[in-house]
Amino acid sequence: MDNLTGRLLVAVPREEQDVADDDLFDRSVVLLLNHSSEGAHGIVLNRPLEAVVDAVLPGWQEHVTDPDHLFQGGPLGLDSALGLVSMPGGGESLGLKRLFRGVGLVDLDAPPSVVLPEIAALRIYAGHSGWGPGQLETEIREGHWFVVDAEAADAFSESPLRLWEDVLRRVGGVAAWSITFPDDPTMN
C-alpha cells in the first residue's frame, strides 16, 4: 500500500448496534501524520472537547484557532498534548517541525511568542490515534475507512462537528452517498 502520510481516513458509517457509546472513531476524520511499514499514527480532527486549552496548557488559549477548545486526537496518550499548526512559509523554525505540505507540529514547551509569527493556525489535541504494522492496511481492506486527499483547511475547520459530512460530500460518489446512512437503519 502507498504511503498515506498527509491523507485523511474518513470512517465508513456503521449501524448503531455496531458502535460502542465511547467509540471515538464513529463518523470520525483522522489526519495521518505518519504511515510506514512500522505502523501509522494520526489525530482525529472532529472531536472537540468541553475543556479549554488553558486547563492543560496555560498561555496557549488565546492563540488557538476557533473553536478554541481542546480536541481529542485519539484514544492513546491522553496525558499528552500535541499542537498541530499551519505553516505557510517554506522552511522550519525554532519550535516548529514541518510534517508535510503546510502542516507541522509545534513544540508546546516553547514560548508562544517564539512560534506564533511563523504559523497561520493552531489546534491543540489531547492524545493521538495509532495502528501497529499492517493494522491500518487491514482496516482499509475490510472497508472501515475511506482514504481521501486532505485539504489545507480540514485540520483547522471552523465547523469540526460537520467535518465528516463536509469531507464525504467533497469526495462525492459512494462516499458522499454514505452521509445518508442512518444511525439506526430500522428507523428509515
Image (cartoon, helix red, strand yellow):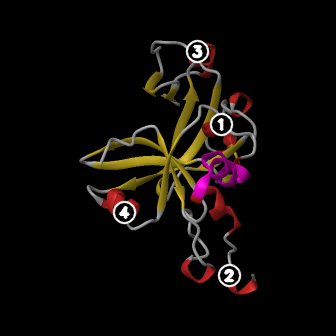
Quarter of the image for the C terminus: give it.
bottom right
Disc 2 + disc 1, Cβ < 8 Å: no
Q: CA distance from mark 4 to mark 2?
A: 24 Å
Viewer-proximal residue, 83 or 170?
Answer: 170
Residue placed under numbered mark 2 in the picture: 185
* Structural distance between the alpha carbons of marks 1 and 3: 16 Å
The magenta-colored residue range is: 161-173
Which numbered disc covers residue 141? 4
Tell me where residue 143 appears, x and y as whole percent: 44, 65
| Label annotation for residue 118 | 3
Amino acid identity at mark 3: Glu
Write down the residue under mark 1: 156
Q: Are marks 1 and 4 in contact (CB under 8 Å)?
A: no
Which of marks 3 and 2 precedes in the sequence? 3
Relative vertical location of residue 157 with respect to residue 40 in this rendering, above or below:
above
Q: Mark 3 or mark 1, which is nearer the start of the sequence?
A: 3
Q: What element does badge 1 sit on?
A: helix
Whole-Å distance between the Cαs marked 2 and 1? 32 Å
The residue drawn where x is 55% and y is 35% is 83
- Disc 1 + disc 3, Cβ < 8 Å: no
Q: Residue at point 48% right, 25% down?
A: 101
Q: Nearer the observer, disc 1 or disc 4?
A: 4
Q: Of the residues under marks 3 and 4, which one precedes in the sequence?
A: 3
The residue sitting at 63% across, 79% down in the picture is 16
